[in-house]
Image (cartoon, helix red, strand yellow):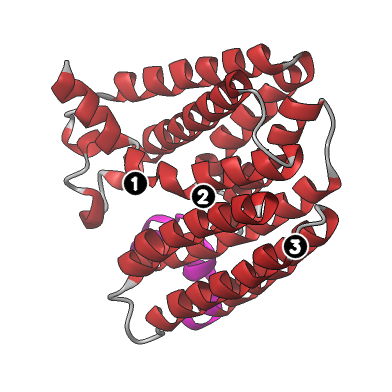
Amino acid sequence: MLEKVKLYAQLVKFEHTIFAVPFVLAAVFIVEKGLPPLDKVFWILTAAVAGRTAGMAFNRFFDLPFDRLNPRSKNWVSVTGAVKAGEILALAVISSAVLVFSAYQLNKLAFYLSPVAIALLIIYPLGKRFTDFVHLILGAVYFIIPIAVSVALKGSIEPSTVFLGLGMAFWVAGFDIFYALQDIEFDRKVGVHSIPARFGVKKAIMFARIFHILTLIFLILTGVYAQLGYIYFAGLFVLAGFLLYEHSLIKENDLSKINVAFFTVNGYVSILYMVFVIADIYF
């Protein structure tokens, strides 16, 4: 049983939950201006983890025809058969059900809107088949996260969470472009759509830079509308430094440091953002 759990964790790259959860908690503190009742925090985090798990499982399930052909993914548990296609789909469906149940525990509006999140999780992997701007579909998934937090806690949408959602959307779309650089030739060969496959490495890097500039602009607006203080805005300078470092690692003629930029730097960005938000609110 434990071995199976480990396989499922590998399947959905559970450790990468670190990209989303700190932003979820940051949104909680921004909306509540502190820590809400712990039962609400529990159901919000359960919904977030379930949603991410469902998204990764749907992605692995729909991408199986491509992953079986891609040398980079030949050892993935979904490709080797360690986790069967039926199991992947079952995990996606069960995780989606947990998301809906968690939303029901929060309030009726969150429950009624939960299918929107699931729809986006399904559209993203399918989007690779018809749009070069599929990264923005993934961005849309992250856009609704802080808005969902606001609905869960207040039953309405706080303006600051819209700007936070836009910041998160362009942040994740930017680093998803970097991730897609690894498969640019493969994607062109098999017909997978992406900004790198359509526009090439140089222009793809420019798209990512523009997206991350927009990220910082929207995070500034988040602070303004949430009436956050100097700790928050000082923290944004630190985050800007991390984003600059991330972009310094990706060069048109040297893509060897994509994994460092994608996994390590973005993990720090999400955690530090949460830390600066909480520190600003409490101090």
Image-quadrant location for residue 117: top right
Question: In the figure, is residue 194 to the left or right of 35?
Answer: left
Of the two numbered discs 3 and 1 on the same chain, state the one appearing first in sequence. 1
Of the two numbered discs 2 and 3 on the same chain, state the one appearing first in sequence. 2
Label 1 residue SS: helix
Image-quadrant location for residue 75: top left
| Residue where numbered disc 1 is placed | 66
Whether residue 212 is visible here, answered yes or no, is: yes
Q: Position of residue 172 (x, y in %)?
A: 55, 56
Q: Position of residue 52 (x, y in %)?
A: 48, 35
Nearest to the observer: residue 32 or residue 69: 32
Amino acid type, mark 1? Phe
Question: Which residue appears at 70% of the width and 49% of the height?
Answer: 165
Answer above or below: position of 84 versus 13: above
| Residue where numbered disc 3 is placed | 229
Q: Is residue 201 magenta?
A: yes
Answer above or below: position of 123 versus 172: above
Question: Label 2 crowding class (10 Å Cα cut-off): few <14, some 14-19, many 20+?
Answer: many
Image-quadrant location for residue 109: top right
Q: Give the magenta-colored segment's residue range.
A: 186-205
| Residue where numbered disc 2 is placed | 128
Question: Which residue appears at 73% of the width and 22% of the height?
Answer: 110
Asked if disc 1 and disc 2 are in contact, CB closer than 8 Å, the reply is yes
Label 3 residue SS: loop
Q: CA distance from mark 3 to mark 1?
A: 47 Å
Answer above or below: position of 236 versus 165: below
